[in-house]
Image (tube, coloured by chain):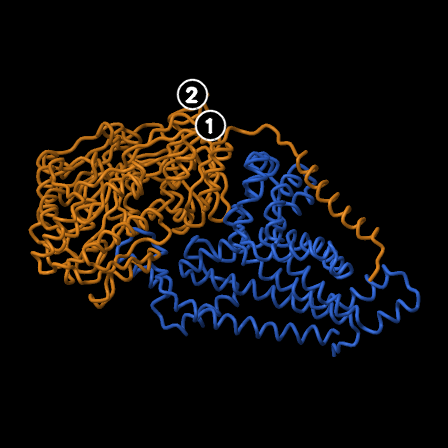
Amino acid sequence: MPVNGRLARVLAAAVVVSLVAAGAAAGCGKTTKTPTVAVYASANQPIVFWDPSDSYSNEIIVMNNIYETLLRYDPAKDKLIPVLATSYQVSPDGLTWTFELRKGVKFHTGNEMTADAVKASIERTMKRGMGASFIWSAVKEIKVLDRYKVEFDLSYPAPLDMICASGYGAHIFDPSVVQANGEDWFAAGHEAGTGPYMLESFTGKEEVVLTKFPDYWGGWKGQHFDKIVFQEVSEASTRAQMVQAGQADFVDNLPIEQIDRLRSDPNVAITQTPSFQNLLGFFNTAKPPLDNVLVREALSYAVPYDQIITEVMKGTATQGQGPVPKGMWGHDDSLPQPTYDLAKAKQLLTQAGFPNGGFKLVLTYASGDETERRVAELYKASLAQLGINLEIRGMPWEPQWDLAKATKPADRQDIFVMYWWPDYCTPYSWLNAMFHSEDTINFNLGYYKNPEYDKLIDEAQKLSGSNRAQAVEEFKQAQKILCNDWVAIYFFDQNYVRAMRADFKGYVDNPAYPHVVFFYNTYRGSK
Amino acid sequence: MRAFIVRRLLLGLVVVLGLTVVTFFIARVVPSDPAARWVGPRATVEQIERARVKLGLDKPIYIQYLRYMGDLLRGDWGVSIVTHQPVLRDIATYLPASLELTFYGMLLAIIVGIPLGVLSAVHKDRAVDHLSRAFSIGAVSLPTFWVAMVFQLVFFGYLHILPLGGQLDMAVKLAYSIPRVTGMYTVDALLAGNWTVFLNALEHLVLPAVTLATYPVGLITRMLRSSMLEVSNEDYIRVARAYGLPEGRVIYVYALKNAIGPTITVIALTFAYSLAGTFLIEAVYNWPGLGHYAADAVLAADYPAIMGVTIVVAFFYVLLNLLVDIIHAVLDPRIKTV
């Protein structure tokens, strides 16, 4: 069909011109003066629970800027810092704790924080029974002694100061909003905290904008950010580009390769801090052949620890020494650490009656987690050399957990891989949640049942508030029991590696509050 | 015509209803525990059980379905297990963003694809045709997320002329507050008369819209080309030429009008699909659309959200199909619409 070629050329030109015009016009859009803003780009949605009594998920990063607790824990100095409480005393038997509260603290609602508010907050959290409310299980009664003095009476001794400093479930909020607006007011997207920043707006689950609370008790002398924006950016490469371009000040969860690429960028600062997060693999102690302690010991010597640390973690982790990470009080430095020793593993297997392996195991881990996948792959290759067929399965959390709770024990996995980090800083968090015998399966995913061990850690927990030294002794004994029984693989204790703008100053990584940035302490400095 | 439209809408309702039944029951097959997802990763068994009762997940499936439909008819679309917000509010947040992106993307695909399709048919087997074939095959074959990342790297990372992602620059968003009428920044900014926001929003739309247009543009080009070639052999085209009509009129009035039918159907289907199907584009460009919401919902077995998105997308499919049928009837009066 001979055609007027001019028509075609005109059309093409029109398309090109309009595209160029749009691009040029867009480039002309200039912005005007804005308040100082810090942006936190996270891999996960910033808020799951708005309710401070229910909060037990990713929103810890937002909640700890809106709300405050009575005390805050500094693991580097192993000290508790006064926040909403200025001082406290504990009775010799560890059952009565008295806190003096800071005067003149205002809620974002305008009301003053008093002992009544503290009592009502914690009682509501306990009553709702959601999230991390279990941390208050030792509390029998809360008494208001006077306007700024509150007393906790416990039914058994517990480290209440550490509990009050928890990043989850210990937030103090203005109880009058609940009385006025009902129980679901928080969940609809409202807050009533004392913290330096208050909620300005939020979009769906992706974005939360906080703004300065002018009446914050700490005052606003010095440099501070006016607004904080939390964004969900699920794509790691996008997060990395954001921090390089200055569109994000702080990003979490970057894969090691992205981190290494960013190290050479002068605009980006990388920090590495030991954390309280570790990766464990639980042996199914209730199912053959892992019900045999010799087999478990053999498999513990078949883990390529060094390869994992250098190749998978690129030096951002250290091999685990027992279930409690190094740096947490109560960690036992004298615990034995297995090495990667296939010869020894083979010898132990032979002793157990499996000289050439010859059995199959199923290992489950969190799908989408590159680190866990690589660890599992390395372990699979190593076990193959012993004649053991390791099937590795990446699953989303809920199905992985469901499988571990399957009604037929024969259906359950042989090795369950997962991370753990504490609710509040005590060895009990690891030793209890994951190794205390359970009637209904929760997090003891090795199904370990040892009544002597249970008694030991329960007692140690009670002592930790009043007699720390004795508690430490008993926690250490408990860890020795676990190690002798080879209950789990302690792959590594993780370091938190953070990428942030080089001019984002004032951030100190506090592993007791994982991934939390206390923005009040940060400011825009010079590189 | 009016009876035709009413009949088709009623039929569409039946389709959506049937879809709700199928989706509701299929979603249950996915091995995931929404009650566990609701309470968060560190919940106790008792908390999960309580959540299960609260969410009504302990009842038999057909009771849950009837309850859901009952609530739906009263305007309660349930609460999302992932976001903990009412599903209707979530959809009101994410749908406009998806509509905006899909609209601009499809517009781009049409503006480029239709002329290209016509040109390659007209200049069959010449340079234009070969180039357009290479272009369209490349366009449908390249994986969308790869294209998205490459665009990001080139236009943002190296050339610094287009934004990385999101709908607006953070600074612009915080500095201006525009009343939310439709939820689409380009429309709302125009309604508020705010040029800065409008241009900034347009700037942020360029890369995602172009990425979204990649697949449809290839499809449209190829479809239209083959339709045009078919039509060009028809007698009435020969007659039109014999009458001495200008070639432009022959192509664009006589040929295109008769050839464009199947292409319009494809455009409509692609539009409806792109509303929730572009979650890869949304993930890379951090675009808060339905795709990302739906993907998270499916992974978490978030039943209310899955149902909500299904109903909304099904509604658009029905609407767009109806529109297509009307357009076909207009283009070809021989089609019976009684």
Q: Nearer the viewer, residue B208 or A86?
A: B208
Q: Nearer the viewer, mark 2 or mark 1?
A: 1
Q: Residue at x 56, y 63 (%)?
A: B313
Report the side of B207 relative to A319 (left or right): right
Quarter location, residue B273: bottom right
Instruction: Give the amino acid at mark 2.
Output: Lys
Residue position marked by numbered label 2 in the rendering: A221
Of the numbered discs 2 and 1, the one sitting upstream in the chain is 2
State the SS at label 1.
Answer: loop
As drawn, B282 above or below A151? below
Give the colour chain B carries in the figure.
Answer: blue
Q: Residue at x 30, y 30 (%)?
A: A83
In whole angstroms, how far apart are the C-alphas of marks 2 and 1? Answer: 27 Å
Instruction: Give the amino acid at mark 1.
Output: Asn
What is the letter of the orange chain? A
How dense is the environment of label 1, judged by Cα within 10 Å: few (below 14), some, or many (20 and up)?
Answer: some
Q: Residue at x 20, y 58 (%)?
A: A388
| Location of residue B295 in the rendering, given as x and y in whole percent from the top left corner | 47, 57
Q: Nearer the viewer, residue A39 or A132?
A: A39
As drawn, A260 above or below B180? above
Q: Chain of mark 1?
A: A
| Residue A140 seen in the figure | no
